[in-house]
Image: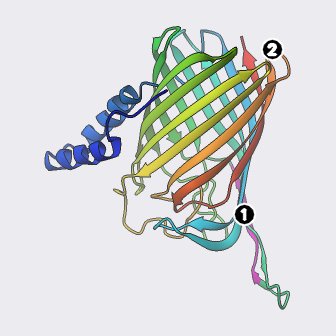
Amino acid sequence: MYSFTVNLSEFRWELESLCLKMNLKKLHTILFILLVVPLTLAAGDGWVQPRGSGYFKLSQYWVIADQHYTNTGGIDPNATRGTYITSLYGEYGFTDRFTGVLYFPFFVRALQYEQVSGTTGEVILPGDAINSVGDTQLTIKYGIVQTDKIVFSGSLSVGLPFGNNRGGQDGSLQTGTGEWNQMARLDVSKSFRVGTLDSFASIYSAFNNRTNGFSDEFRYGVKLGLLVDKFSLQVTVDGVRSFKNGDANFNSEGTGLYSNNAEYLAITPEVAYKITDQWGISAAFAGAVSGKLIFARPAYSAGVFFTLN
């Protein structure tokens, strides 16, 4: 249904090369991400909450990994590590155009499992763990175009470094990055019918400005959804690409959820069921099909949500 009309990757890097010569690389890159990409694809979740309406979700996320993607994209083993995140996500419509969004991971547990020799039974590496709140994100979202045919919204987010970025005995356990960041994002969405079923398609693109030695990021994604009675099914493809403009050899001990220069392309199927008109449950898992400096094992999540009408 949708097709690319230009080679976006080639165009993007050519644009950056030109902008670098003009000493305007970051400015032009931001303009490309926020303007060219969404309009070219002509398809995120662009809907905003109506005034006084909201969506709230309590979720549990977890990942356990004994291997990771290296900085070259290969896969290497590592001591088994796990991260568990209990979070609250909320959207609330202050007006018919402005929506406030909160992501608050109020309990995060990061741990390294004890490594025991299968031959001698001796402890090779002791276990370790930390508990903390996690990095929080506040967002204001504005509905630029809100019609029956298509919706288009822009948002600005600020990341609050509430998490612990150097925990555990060796300082490698993390529940956050320890850095402030600001992200500008555009979403475009369209609803349509597939036979007798309601469906939707969304795309987003974003520029994440990071601090404290972290590299800036380009983020993008596509989502397809289908509504079947009280069930909703959706598949999201998310990508992150690092500009690699941070400190050299920074955060070298961290490979996981909070690494610098992490990149990935991940696919996330999710199913939700509405128990009542307001309450429902959901479950999802995410797996990276490629990556750098991240865990190479799938992550899982489950939650309960409430809609305020």
| Residues in magenta, as a range | 124-132
Q: Residues within 10 Å of mark 1 (few under 14, many from 20)?
A: many
Residue 217 painted magenta: no
Location of residue 107 in the rendering, given as x and y in whole percent from the top left corner: 73, 46
Seen from the viewer's position, the closer of residues 79 and 13 is: 13
Location of residue 238 in the rendering, given as x and y in whole percent from the top left corner: 54, 42
Location of residue 173 in the rendering, given as x and y in whole percent from the top left corner: 64, 63
Alpha carbons under labels 1 and 2: distance apart: 38 Å
Q: How many marks?
A: 2
Mark 1 belongs to which amino acid?
Leu
Residue at point 60%, 30% (across, down): 224
Residue 96 lies in what quarter of the image?
A: top right
Location of the C terminus (image quadrant): top right
Q: Is residue 252 visible?
A: yes
Q: Residues within 10 Å of mark 2 (few under 14, many from 20)?
A: few
Disc 1 + disc 2, Cβ < 8 Å: no
Q: Mark number for residue 277?
A: 2
Q: Mark number for residue 111?
A: 1
Residue 115 lies in what quarter of the image?
A: bottom right
Mark 2 belongs to which amino acid?
Asp
In the picture, measured across the screen, residue 155 lies left or right of residue 36, that is right
The residue furthest front is 195
In the picture, measured across the screen, residue 220 lies left or right of residue 36, that is right
Query: Counting residues from the N terminus, which is met first, the one under dot 1 or under dot 2?
Result: 1
The chief SS type of the magenta part is strand
Residue at point 17%, 46% (across, down): 18
69 shown above or below 15: below
The residue furthest left is 22
Residue 126 painted magenta: yes
Residue at point 80%, 20% (across, down): 230
The residue furthest bottom is 120
User: Helix or strand or loop: what does disc 1 sit on?
Assistant: strand
